[in-house]
């Protein structure tokens, strides 16, 4: 279920939103909805993806050694063989 919200934006901003929505194949409503989601996102999650990627990069060899059947190279090969 969704709830309508009315906001007022300057004409120039509205034009920019329309241009971006068209370029991305979406709607102004979708862009604003995503911006609202970002506004309420837990700040503790900021940068979490980058931290996780760095952790994986730093520990990939240890993970592969501990879980050889789940190593990315092995999974890639089994997917190609399937």
Image (cartoon, rainbow, N blue to C red):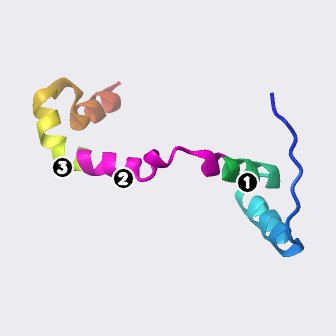
Indicate the secondary structure of the residue bearing disc 1: helix
Determine whether, in the image, residue 21 is placed left or right of residue 78. right
Residue 81 position, x and y percent, is: 31, 28
Q: Residues within 10 Å of mark 3 (few under 14, many from 20)?
A: few
**For residue 53, above or below residue 77:** below
- The residue labelled by disc 3 is 58
- Helix, strand or loop for disc 3: helix
Identify the image quadrant of residue 12.
bottom right
Mark 2, other Cα within 10 Å: few <14 / some 14–19 / many ≥20: few
**Residue depicted at x 65% and y 46%:** 37
Q: Residues within 10 Å of mark 1 (few under 14, many from 20)?
A: some
- State which quarter of the image contains the N terminus: top right
Q: Looking at the rendered structure, which numbered label has been put on residue 50?
A: 2
Mark earlier in primary sequence (3, 2): 2
Residue 32 point in image, percent of width and height: 75, 53
How would you classify the magenta stretch by its main secondary structure? Answer: helix
Q: Secondary structure at mark 2?
A: helix
Which residue is denoted by mark 1 in the rendering? 31
Displayed quadrant of residue 3: top right
Compute the Cα span from label 1 to label 3: 35 Å
User: Measured from the top left, where is residue 67 in percent x and y?
Assistant: 16, 26
Q: Residue at x 33, y 32 (%)?
A: 80
Foreground pick, 48 / 65: 48
Q: Rounded to the nearest whole Å, what is the CA distance between mark 3 and mark 2?
A: 12 Å
Determine if the magenta segment contains residue 29: no
Distance between the Cα atoms at labels 2 and 1?
24 Å
Q: Between disc 1 and disc 3, whose residue precedes? A: 1
Q: Quadrant of residue 79?
A: top left
Q: Are marks 1 and 3 in contact (CB under 8 Å)?
A: no
Range of residues picked out in magenta: 37-55
Q: Nearer the viewer, residue 35 or 61?
A: 35
């Amino acid at each position: 279920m969704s709830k309508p919200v009315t906001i007022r934006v300057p004409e120039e901003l509205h034009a920019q939103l329309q241009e971006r929505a068209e370029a991305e194949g979406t709607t102004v409503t979708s862009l604003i909805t995503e911006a609202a989601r970002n506004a309420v996102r837990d700040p503790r999650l900021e940068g979490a993806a980058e931290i996780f990627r760095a952790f994986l990069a730093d520990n990939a060899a240890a993970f592969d050694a501990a879980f050889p059947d789940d190593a990315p190279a092995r999974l890639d090969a089994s997917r190609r063989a399937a």
